[in-house]
Amino acid sequence: MTSLKGVKVVEFCEIAAGPFCAMLLADSGAEVIKVERPAGDAMRMWPPISDGYSENFASINRNKKSVILDLKTEQGRSAAKQLILNSDVVVENFRPGVLNRLGIDYGTMSAIKETLIYCSISAFGQTGPRAKEGGFDLTMQAMAGVMSVTGEPGGPPVKCGVPLCDFVSALYGAYGVSNAIVERASTGKGQHIDVAMLGATLAIGALQTSEYFGTRTDPKKLGSAHPRNAPYQAFKANDGYFGMAAGNNNLWELVCDVLGKDQWKFDDRFLNPKLRAQNQTALKELLEKEFKHNTVSYWLQSFNEKGVPCSPINSYSEALLDKQVSHMGWVQEITLPNGHKTKTFGPALRIDNTISAIRQPPPELGEHTDDVLMHLGAKEVNQMEESA
């Protein structure tokens, strides 16, 4: 995918949200220079470590160049300014106010180059009563309500096992940058995109927030169940669990057909999705009474033959080995800078039935510092000579 080919991005980010945002831009063809402090992005130390290189870091930093700059020094800040002024986009996830103290904030730099696009990802946004507060995925899941609806009814708070807030904020960031690039083509001006993790997480909770606005009651934990559809959850067979979602009347009737329970179609408790959801505890008991007579594979085959959406409860190893994952070409081989060969989940989008290849592996810390800064220095000299 090369839709952003020719776009230059400077990334001042660590850990997850910012780096994933910049990687999405890189996957779309942008040239991304990752600016790291001398000790490097802290994720470089996260296991699993393969021959001294973090595979966690590798998973969200492909297709980038790494440059070391010490922003605590005048020399480092000067180089950062040069990088920014020779770029189209800045992605950063410092706490609000840090870039201002360094003199490389949007206001300062856009006054010199008005076409600059900044994407700032922070816990709460660039302004407001909480702007100076920090946050991580866990605290954002807690504050945005995600943990209040995750887990079993009556159970303790549970976070989503995937760092939801980090990565959805990154997606909103990449979406915002792409929009700003399109708008700049007509206006000639850049924009400052303010991505608040709290806002991004509340935004994808659209069904939960609308439930509150419509009823003035808080959504509740339902385990794997759905507040408005049933059967729509994990069910237990005689050798394990599987997921099955019959989210409309037609699918519900097919479930009844598979089970040979035609009378359930006319049960007053189960006549439509709303009634089935209201009575889903009783419905689950009836269904699992039948499911216990056979295996997960039996029920998956039976429901698949009828066209009822269903799935095994996969581990990640099982999910990554699924035949559809192989067909789509999502898992790609990469060689880390230390020579270690591994695999990673590559770009998820297919364009014109083609998956995007990984152009370059994740970088060694500071791997491109000399080349990038030497090029900047030569470019600056040339510009001075032309202006003279």
Image (tube, helix red, strand yellow):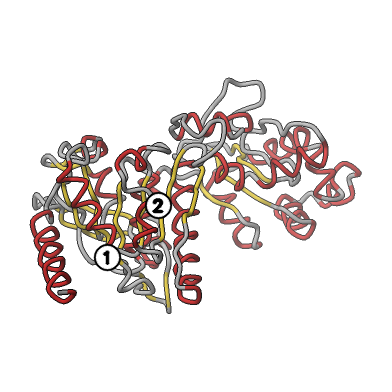
Residue sitting nearer the eye, 211 or 152: 211
The residue at the point 55 percent across, 46 percent down is 200
Q: Which mark is residue 31?
A: 1
- Quick one: which residue is furthest to the front in this view? 388
Residue 387, horizontal then vertical, whole percent? 18, 74
Callout 2: SS = helix
Report whether 363 appears left or right of 206. left
Of marks 2 and 1, the one in the foreground:
2
Q: Are marks 2 and 1 in contact (CB under 8 Å)?
A: no
Residue drawn at point x = 66 percent, y = 31 percent: 221
Identify which residue is drawn at 43% across, 63% down. Answer: 324
Q: Quadrant of the N terminus?
A: bottom left
Quadrant showing the C terminus: bottom left
Residue at the outermost bottom position = 352
Query: Dot 1, how many residues are within 10 Å of its Cα: few (below 14), some (14-19), or many (20+)?
Result: many
Residue at 74% in and 47% down? 229
Q: As rendered, which of 370 and 239 lies closer to the eye? A: 370
**Number of dots carrying numbers:** 2
Position of 132 relative to 192 (above/below)? above
Q: Which residue matches tag 2?
A: 106
Q: Is residue 6 above or below residue 213?
A: below
The image quarter in which residue 332 lies: bottom left
| Callout 2 crowding tier (Cα within 10 Å): few <14, some 14–19, many ≥20 | many
| Three-letter code, disc 1 | Glu
Instruction: Classify 90 as above or below 288.
Output: below
The location of residue 188, given as percent across then percent down, is 45, 73
Q: CA distance from mark 2 to mark 1?
A: 20 Å
Q: Nearer the viewer, residue 333 or 64?
A: 64
- Of mark 2 and mark 1, the one earlier in the sequence is 1
